């Protein structure tokens, strides 16, 4: 049996279980009746059938065939279904806000129904006739459970506060879900940040990142060691199964090979943690920027006196050292059209505004004038040593003064030349902007900076190599862009403009960066 014409050009890829049936016999017949194929229907996404045949699994374009048999779905009354599972920080407020905005844009009726303590359902309907168009189910548990649900085929999209771990990637690949680390399999929908929080009555206003790690590990136990009162510190953290709890360990304790103190109090979600810290005058917790509750967020300072708070701009540029991307992980499946439209909407400028209003940091690029960066340049002058002469500072000001800094910044994983997750996403984002002509007839300068560890000369050379590597990565990703219309340049100033103190690995990592300046 041969299947040709409309059905033969069907894409051979997997798609989501938007419509899943127990395997039932179906017969798909071409519109002219000349060709037919029989087998067990495995799934339908509103456009394509997935059928198990004697020749293997085939994916068939529904527009070119008629379906007959007990397993045939309704084409006219098809309902797109998708299941999200994972981090409550993402699913509690952010995703509902985006879904509501999406419904308003497309003039769909939207309703919400609680299914149990962890799950709720959003339905999208046609306002003209009330017909059901889509069902979006959310399960709020934690990042670990989100990946477990995906692997058990109980979820289609994972809401994660961290990158997928190697064992999760391997198990997904073995289950036929593709490479979750590949391009297009994950998306950073918004940005957040890990912030140390205390009760509003606590007199301490800032803490160094090494001190924060020492508090979490129990090495520092009294507030007097942090410039506060003579009182014991109570440590509050999110549960180790949550994405933010795991990020706390990964970002703060693992780099110094420390473990969490056994006296730490654990909480299942951010609101519970911040409520406990707000009521504890001697407590210190690590929460998310988006869920501060009634606590006071401490700035992260260095021994050199430079301090950074988790402001929207500092998080967007990753100048804040504990920036936390919010991920959606998707297997190599085809999603129904309505779901695909929603995922595309997440990149829309109006969606970025919704993200900001929901208390998160959006990813829309912004241009910052040099006049709005006086603190950075003042710090560069104050920190300049014998290896960064006045002439180099003057050259930096001369080169950058006519330009504006984009909030799109590129940083690298600790101890690696590999871009971190947010920066890899930034490559694709900037490449798309080049492809649609957003920067046509403009000048983009990739500017490399380094930490101050080691001689200034070699650091500057390394910084320029990193800037060139980022420029090449963006150029290669912008496959359809006409780069003849854009001027792409590379510059480097090494350790001339630090964003943080070099007295810790966290500070040095923040200082190793490639910025994009535009005119």
Image (cartoon, rainbow, N blue to C red):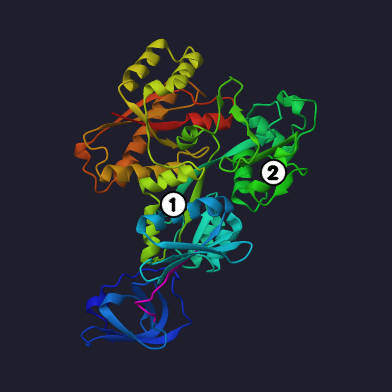
Question: Looking at this view, is 472 or 227 the one in front?
Answer: 227
The mark nearer the N terminus, 1 or 2, is: 1
Q: Which residue: 35% across, 16% down?
A: 395
Which element carries disc 1, helix, strand or loop?
strand
State the extent of the magenta-drawn residues as a range: 73-83
Q: Residues within 10 Å of mark 2 (few under 14, many from 20)?
A: some
Q: CA distance from mark 1 to mark 2?
A: 31 Å
| Residue 406 falls left or right of residue 87 | left
| Residue 380 falls left or right of residue 196 | left
Locate residue 256: give its quadrant: top right
| Quadrant that contains the C terminus | top left
Which residue matches tag 2?
275
Q: Main secondary structure of the magenta part?
A: loop
Above or below for 226 versus 291? above
Question: Looking at this view, is 113 or 450 the one in front?
Answer: 113
Question: Looking at this view, is 443 or 66 the one in front?
Answer: 66
Q: Residues within 10 Å of mark 1 (few under 14, many from 20)?
A: many
Which residue matches tag 1?
187
Q: Which residue: 71% across, 30% down?
A: 201
Q: Position of residue 95 (x, y in %)?
A: 49, 54
Q: Which residue: 27% across, 75% down?
A: 63
Label at residue 53: none
Residue 325 is inside the magenta segment: no
Locate residue 298: give its quadrant: top right
In this rendering, which labeled residue sits more in front, label 1 or label 2? 2
Residue 76 is inside the magenta segment: yes
| Residue 254 falls left or right of residue 283 | left
């Amino acid at each position: 049996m041969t299947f040709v014409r409309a059905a033969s050009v069907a894409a051979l890829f997997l798609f989501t279980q938007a419509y899943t049936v127990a395997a039932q016999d179906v017969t798909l017949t071409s519109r002219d009746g000349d060709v037919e194929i029989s087998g067990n229907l495995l799934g339908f996404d509103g456009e394509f059938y997935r059928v198990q045949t004697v020749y293997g699994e085939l994916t068939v374009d529904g527009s070119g065939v008629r379906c007959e048999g007990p397993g045939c779905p309704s084409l006219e009354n098809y309902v797109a279904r998708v299941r999200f599972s994972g981090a409550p920080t993402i699913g509690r407020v952010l995703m509902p806000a985006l879904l509501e905005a999406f419904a308003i844009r497309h003039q769909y009726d939207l309703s919400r129904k609680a299914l149990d303590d962890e799950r709720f359902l959003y339905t999208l309907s046609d306002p003209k006739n009330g017909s059901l168009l889509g069902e979006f189910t959310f399960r709020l548990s934690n990042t670990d459970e989100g990946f477990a649900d995906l692997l058990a085929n109980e979820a289609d999209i994972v809401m994660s506060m961290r990158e997928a771990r190697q064992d999760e990637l391997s198990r997904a690949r073995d289950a036929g879900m593709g490479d979750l680390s590949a391009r297009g399999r994950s998306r950073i929908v918004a940005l957040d940040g890990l912030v140390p929080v205390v009760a509003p009555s606590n007199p301490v206003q800032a803490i160094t990142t090494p001190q924060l790690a020492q508090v979490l590990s129990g090495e520092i136990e009294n507030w007097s060691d942090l410039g506060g009162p003579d009182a014991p510190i109570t440590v509050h953290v999110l549960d180790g199964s949550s994405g933010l709890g795991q990020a706390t360990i990964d970002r703060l304790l693992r780099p110094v090979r420390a473990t969490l103190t056994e006296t730490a109090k654990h909480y299942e979600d951010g609101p519970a943690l911040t409520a406990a810290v707000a009521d504890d005058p001697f407590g210190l917790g690590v929460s998310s920027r988006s869920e501060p509750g009634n606590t006071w967020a401490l700035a992260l300072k260095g021994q050199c006196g430079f301090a950074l708070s988790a402001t929207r701009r500092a998080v967007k540029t990753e100048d804040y050292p504990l920036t936390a991307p919010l991920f959606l992980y998707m297997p190599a499946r085809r999603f129904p059209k309505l779901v695909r439209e929603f995922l595309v909407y997440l990149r829309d400028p109006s969606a970025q505004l919704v993200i900001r209003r929901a208390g998160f940091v959006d990813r829309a690029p912004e241009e910052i004038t040099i006049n709005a960066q006086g603190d950075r340049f003042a710090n560069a002058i104050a920190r300049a040593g014998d290896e960064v002469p006045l002439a180099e500072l003057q050259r930096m000001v001369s080169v950058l003064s006519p330009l504006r800094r984009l909030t799109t910044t590129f940083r690298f994983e600790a101890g690696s030349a590999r871009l971190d997750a947010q920066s890899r996403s930034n490559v694709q984002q900037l490449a798309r902007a080049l492809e649609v002509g957003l920067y046509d007839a403009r000048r983009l300068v990739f500017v490399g900076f380094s930490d101050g560890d080691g001689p200034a000369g070699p650091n500057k050379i390394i910084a320029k190599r990193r800037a060139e590597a980022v420029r090449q990565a963006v150029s290669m990703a912008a496959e359809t862009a006409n780069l003849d219309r854009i001027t792409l340049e590379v510059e480097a100033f090494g350790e001339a403009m630090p964003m943080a103190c070099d007295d810790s690995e966290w500070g040095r990592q923040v200082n190793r960066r490639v910025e994009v300046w535009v005119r």
